[in-house]
Amino acid sequence: MFGRLSVILSVAALAVVSCGPSSIRSPMAAQALPEKKEVTAEAFLGEKMFTGFIHTGYEGGEMFYTFFPSRGEPASDPFVMWLTGGPGCSSEIAWLQENGPFWGQPNATLAYNEHSWSSVANMLYVDQPLGTGFSETNDPLNYAKNEKQISKDMDTFLTKFLTLFPHLVDRPFYITGESYAGHYIPSIAHYLLQNPIQGLNFKGVAIGNGWVDPYTQFPAYADFAYANNLISNRTYQHAKKAYQACDRAVESGIWEIANVLCEPLTTQLLGTLNPYDIRLQCEVPPLCYNETGIGNFLNDPSVQEAMGVDKRWVDCNYVVHTTLLGDWILSVRKKVAGLLAAGKAVLIYNGDQDYICNWFGGLDWVHKIQWEHQADFRQKEMTDWVVDGKAVASQKTVENLTFMRVFSAGHMVPMDQPEVALLMFDAFLKGPYGQTRASSVYEQIFM
């Protein structure tokens, strides 16, 4: 699971973790004030944006953020946080390649994204856990090893963030993200339910192609590959038998064994195809996409000066990734059930060309959520969502849970289908379990 979510967990990576530091973390000697900087450089095309660092309470622990006020109604639009997966991949990837105000270009410049999610919401992108993207820590003991640590750090971050942007207090707040954020989001949301932040009006979550429940995702690889004519029937039957050992290892919770048994089966089925989009070849392993342009942009001295950073940017931090390897095997499905029971809006969406977090596994784990309306949700049929006379997705909604399969999209739905993704996002925010206001768009998509 590396990249936005990388299932390429090598034996070398296992060695790094097994020899890693203990879980003791050092408190800061003195709490630093959070930072807020308005970015006005021409390179950002006049887009209103803010960047800064917020200390999380550990020695040298600074979490970096980028905040884009809404292009629509910044004084009233919802407050939305986006988290990229990995684990250890930067959220700059999202605001430069997916749902942010810009499209990063190969020549290290930016182009305007008319389908930015900031068109309808105040968007916050965070580099987390510590060490990801521009976030920093001067002590390797500060790297998070589990979701509890990640959630506590995010609690500290959000509490301080609201002091910088007090106009967002009591604004409807949503947590969104993709890939390994399928672990982050339910865990952080669960923590917020148990430890509410004053002024944070938490309403719901949206998870795209999320790594939520390994118990259902791993068996789905062979089914998805066979259904998409990637493997023969003989290979399919062999894989289904071989996955039985993988399943037992996942259930054991011993990730070292699970990785050895599961990872080869997963990668061998795919061959040289892009695991994030089976229509493509993997040109630049392991992420498969050429991110040289955005890397050159973010490492340009004038851009870094404008953003208030002084650190070489990399898309994904392998130390952060390997420190969390013991976390990836755990299921967080029950935490999603808790959100539904609490009446929070939950949108699960999957691009149907993604292999690594494919929609077969996504729908399966959603069906297995134990909640009041589980039977009704399982029995309800998927229906097409038609835009401009064309079916662009299929979905079903029961109460505050929606599952959507987005057609002709890979792992990064907003990158592959930006207009569809924005319509989906806007409808989610305006639905009866979002801001509780009527929306013809919501009714068109989700009802």
Image (spheres, grey):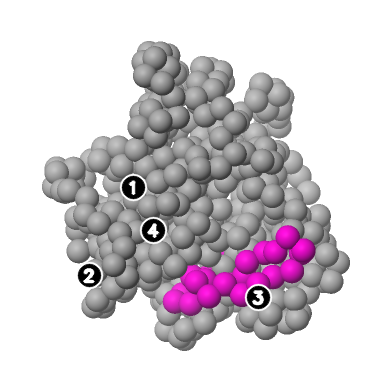
Element type at mark 1: helix
Q: Residues within 10 Å of mark 2 (few under 14, many from 20)?
A: few
What residue do we see at 59% from left, 39% from top? 281
First of labels 1, 2 by sequence position: 1
Mark-to-mark CA distance, 1 and 3: 31 Å
Residue 355 appears in the rendering: yes
Mark-to-mark CA distance, 2 and 3: 34 Å
Q: Quadrant of the C terminus?
A: bottom left
Q: Quadrant of the N terminus?
A: top right
Residue 439 picture quarter: bottom left
Q: Is 285 rendered above or below residue 35?
A: above
Mark-to-mark CA distance, 3 and 4: 23 Å
**Image disc number at residue 443:** 2
Mark-to-mark CA distance, 2 and 4: 19 Å
Q: Which residues are magenta?
A: 101-125
Q: Which residue is mark 4?
A: 205
What residue do we see at 73% from left, 60% from top? 106
**Image disc number at residue 50:** 3
Which is more foreground, mark 2 or mark 3? 2
Name the residue type under label 4. Val
Mark 1 touching mark 3, by CB under 8 A? Answer: no
What residue do we see at 15% from left, 48% from top? 380
Q: Which residue is mark 1?
A: 336
Name the residue type under label 1. Val
Q: Is residue 85 left or right of residue 171?
A: right
Residue 252, position as x, y percentages in the image: 43, 19
